[in-house]
Amino acid sequence: MKPQLIHHVRVFLEVAKLGSFTAAADVLEMQKSSTSRSVTALEKELGVKLINRTTRTLVLTEEGRHYFEQCSRGMHEIVMATQLAQTAPASARGHLRVAAPPDFTVRFTAEKVREFLDRYPNVTMDLHFTPKWMDPLAERYDVTVRMGELPDSSLVIRRLGELPRRLYASPDYLARHGTPRAPAELTTHQCVLRSERGSDQIERQWTLRASRRSVNVDVQGRTAVNNVGFIRNLAVAGVGVAVMADAFADPDVEAGSLVPVLSNWSAASLPVYAVTVSQLLPAKTRALLDFLSELLAPMRR
């Protein structure tokens, strides 16, 4: 690629990101007219319109949005490769922006955060706990942690580990409805069902395993939830039998507000993923991913 074309691409990315020729010119320390000419030259080179301009607004065309997404990833790769070359083999340092679901705090506790910071004293962290999917590219996160199914994405996904899951219910619920002695008996019980985020799909069949045996059980229930923490709350409240990660249930089992059901049987584990923009990661990000993998390692089967 010609050096001048690379310059035009960089200008376009800043204009598209900031939504303004003037703002982009300030960041790039250029004149506004020069940024406009660069984008025009890029459009001429590509043979497509990237930005629709009026006197007051600037809107990316469909081709412009696609080009921005692809070039942003490519530019990120270049920046990461440059940083790695400049810092290797330097130790982890810098600021980390991390997004994770609130339920992940059952493993990534405040004590574990302190342990990580003690291990890497030159790293600072901004932790954002939210149930929403946070795109690391659009939201500028170094790492987005996800539990369960992932949305379709062209981003880089790394499996950190998994959380074993079993069946639990409150003593109150079992006193009122009886304790199931075999998986087939679950069909007559109220169960707390899991719904998929962003869809109307509800998990109405549980796959349970014991030793080398595996059975599929059709379950029913009056509540379906897309949040694993609230599934636990409903189970504690006596709404029904629930499948949940042992890490969520253990404190309530110790307190006596939950008891294991069909303790010889387990459900499919809950996978935990890290999502990043690139496979080329600075030392600070690699350190966090390795730490989280260690954190989940004892939970693996």
Image (cartoon, rainbow, N blue to C red):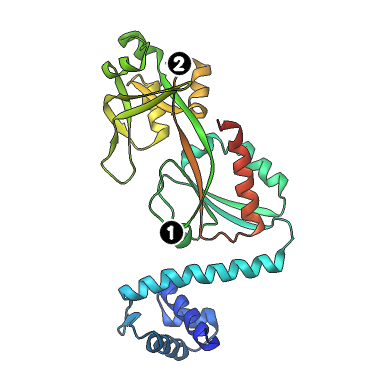
Q: Residue 259, labelled with which disc?
A: 2
- Closest to the observer, 301 or 72: 301
Side of 2 relative to 282 (left or right): left
Residue 74 position, x and y percent, is 50, 70
Which residue corresponds to mark 1? 154
Distance from Cα at disc 1 to Cα at disc 2: 41 Å
On screen, 124 above or below 71?
A: above
- Closest to the observer, 102 or 188: 188
Side of 222 relative to 110 (left or right): left
Question: Dot 2: within a 10 Å radius of its alpha carbon, few (fewer than 14), some, or many (20 or more) residues?
Answer: many
Report the residue at 38% width, 53% height from top: 152
On screen, 76 above or below 297?
A: below
Give, as a three-letter code, the residue at label 2. Answer: Val
Query: Mark 2 falls on what kind of element?
Result: strand
Location of the C terminus (image quadrant): top right
- Closest to the observer, 55 or 45: 45
Q: Quadrant of residue 33?
A: bottom left
Report the residue at 63% width, 53% height from top: 286
Give, as a three-letter code, the residue at label 1. Answer: Ser
Residue 119 position, x and y percent, is 72, 45
Residue 284 position, x and y percent, is 65, 55
Q: Quadrant of residue 82?
A: bottom right
Report the residue at 31% width, 18% height from top: 186
